Image (spheres, grey):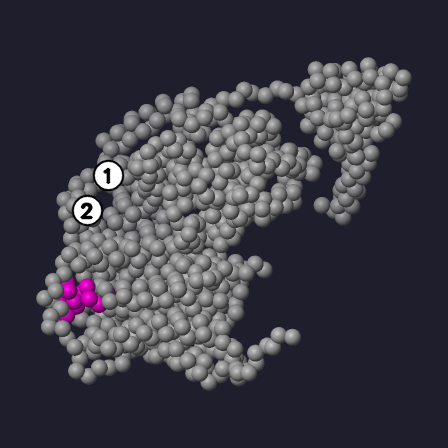
Amino acid sequence: MTPIRVAPWTLGLVVMLVTICMSPMSLDQAFLQAAGYATPLWLAMAGVTGLLGVWLTAGLMEADLAPWAAWLRDALRFPRALFYTLGAGLMLNAWLKVVIVVALGRTPRPVLALALVLIAVYVLRLGMESTIRFVGFLALLIVPAAVVLEALGLLNADVHRALPLDVATVPWLWPAILFAPRGYTVLPVLAPHAGHPWRKAAYLGVALGFLLTFAPILLPVLVFGYPAAAADSAPLFHAIGAFSSTFLPFQRIEFISLISWQMTSGAMTAVYALCALSSLKVRLAPLTPWPAVLGAALATLALALPVWPPQQYAEIMNDWSIYGLLLFFALPAALLSLGRQRGREVVPA
Amino acid sequence: MSFDDILAQGRRVEQALAQAQAEPDPAALKTLYAPEELLDVTVPTPGGPTVRLMYLKSTADVERVRLEVIGPLTTRTGSISEVLPRFTAVASTLDAQQKLLGGAALVFCPDGVLAADMPSATQRSIQEPTSEPAIFSPKDALIEQLDTNVGLIRYHLRDPRLRVDYLSLGSVATARAAVIYVDGVADPDLVDEARQRLAEFRPTRPGFVTSLLRPLYGAIWDGFLPADFTERPYRIADFVSRGRLAILVDGSPFAMITPILLSDLFIDEEEYLQASSTRYFVRALRFLAFHLALLAPGLFSAIMSVNPTIVPGLLAVAVTSSRQSLPYPVFTELLVLMIVVDILAEATISQKSLLGPAISIVGGLVAGQAAIRADLASDLGVIVVSVTMLSTFLTSRAYITYAVRVWKYLIFFISSSLGVVGWATGVMLLVAVFTSRRQFGVQYLAPFSPLLRQDLGSQAHYERGRSPAPRGLRRPRPAP
């Protein structure tokens, strides 16, 4: 069997997209409501967490661990699969919410879910390399489109609407956890297949993705002001939709953000489903039923979760984030510090 | 079919195999062809045995046989191998049959059966390409004869590293094929893999270069062919000099180029004459046209059917007033128009020089105008469908237009159902198809997917001979 190879810079693009998408993009309203607590200190810590996550993943991949720690590292693949599955389900759910609010309110939810899940299952059946290339290529389309859209959205911005800067008196951990870039969570599965310089690409992906995650929060505040933005059901889309042009063939451009959002969600569902299946060492091939089984499970999960109440969704997302931090940050750090194997250097004859 | 029938069939196959593998028998050969076609001549040799000469009048050059076989046999002395040094031994009846069909002369002598190719020199003259018109670049085109075609390619690429590997395709019906590449520039793994796959190929009708697609690439359901087909030797030389392989089959006036990238479709050698700014402008135009052809009807239908609020107010009023007397929705209008225009295009293509212009005028101008006047189509719908069809034919390769036309419908259906969300789903499906495409280890979307930073410059500018073909993650050896 030919080895699976992932180009390092494609991996960087995937990491960046995961960082952007599994952060405020999917729950902009919840973030806005919590934004008052996000002090610069906690935000900086969130950024450092993301970069440290890459470093820890690389360390854990290469470390010579004590037998118990190595066994534990292998056993982590089951909880990881759960994390990825929940992540894909949450992403699908967030996508459903936006599509229902912004575009297709009268279309049955199962039909919508099917449109995305079928794409994800089709891509998964093409194999890991194809899925990664698919996500990487979509990232090349999505990120520039998002930057242009947000730049156009800024034409309606007024800095005075963000003043006075609301700095919390009591810093709270929650926004920092939610803000933490999560690109590194896909690395335990994908990095072993990537060539040099995947670390550089991953660090860049996390850092750029983290910087880009601020736009979805800032733009609605700058366009509508904080109180109106926090009360909106889809603040980012409406902030972009507020831009109106007379010189383009399209008066309103939020449909482009909807297209980007659709592509983002498809890419994220595919990449998290891929990570879930790969964690369970499921071989992806056109004839295996597992992508379809996982797709059906994801669709059920996305449909079972409540779509409307943002607070409830944010709480689920919060629990998922803490679970991810434990799994991809705290546990690897503990294993690396406690489980190092010493005194086993091979002495040349 | 009964068991006895199967047994009888098995026996017949066994007999045929045994016959095919047996030593060539002139009597058996004579039963296969009419006496008017198979010439069986007994030639006395001076001081030696009488030999028997056989050849097909339809495939061999009779004059050459007279000069190169009968002449030496009747005048020179010595052993047959000295008199006819070009002749090689024929092992089996099947081999002898294939030699005869290929235009060889067979000599039956006490030493065994010998054969040498003397194919009839009948061939059409080298003409201008019909499917890829040339304005500024060389105007010659491939013909059916393999050797002539190889000569044309060598004429355009006088590189001592150019290698031509000949092989025979098929087991019963056979055809000669040639794999052409530049040694040291083409990836040797690629060359070996292509040769191996072709050697394993046992086609029933090997005389068409397009019949090689399946053995080389497997089933292609999405319509986007993973290889380029051209009839221009100049284009073949250009590709080969950049590390690609050209595969030619005797009897086919087209060459298959492999591997290719999607970006190859937007490039034409004619552009090398232009200044770089003009060249990039034309390529950008082709790139835009390719996407318009695929995506424009879908996007139009999505916006007008599901998300009409995003167009400017004045435009929305214009569209509504243009459509107000139409009895059906945008989806039906566009679907009917697209089908009609596709029929028109197909009719024009199939009747190229004879009735093509007449069909265009009747179909496009007369029927189109009449449809608008009869309120069966809106002006905007006609514009969208016309621009789509014009864009389809702007790609520099004719064969890719079929895939574009089919995918246009698929994306149109999804978009009409789910609006821009469906349109994005269609685009994602297209991206999935392109990103999963791989030919001999080369990615169709390289160097954008996978993102190969070091190849981006060479591919984006894509000058002639500047760099060998990117091999995806398997990079080629640099040219010496």
Q: Are marks 2 and 1 in contact (CB under 8 Å)?
A: no
Q: Is residue A302 left or right of residue A217?
A: right
Residue placed most toward the observer, B150 or A88 = B150
Q: Secondary structure at mark 1?
A: helix
Q: Is residue B448 left or right of residue A193?
A: left
Residue placed most toward the observer, B61 or B189 = B189
Q: Horizontal and vertical percent for residue A134? A: 41, 56
Q: Residue at x 40, y 22 (%)?
A: B355
Q: Residue at x 77, y 15 (%)?
A: B71
Q: Residue at x 49, y 67 (%)?
A: A192
The residue at which mark 1 appears reads as B380
Q: Are marks 2 and 1 on the same chain?
A: no
The residue at which mark 2 appears reads as A248
User: Which is the main secondary structure of the residues drawn in magenta?
Assistant: helix
Q: Which residues are magenta?
A: A216-229
Residue A209 within the segment the image draws in magenta? no
Q: Secondary structure at mark 2?
A: loop
Question: Which residue appears farthest toward the front when viewing the image?
Answer: A349
Q: Residues within 10 Å of mark 1 (few under 14, many from 20)?
A: some
Q: Residues within 10 Å of mark 2 (few under 14, many from 20)?
A: few
Q: Horizontal and vertical percent for residue B218? A: 56, 47
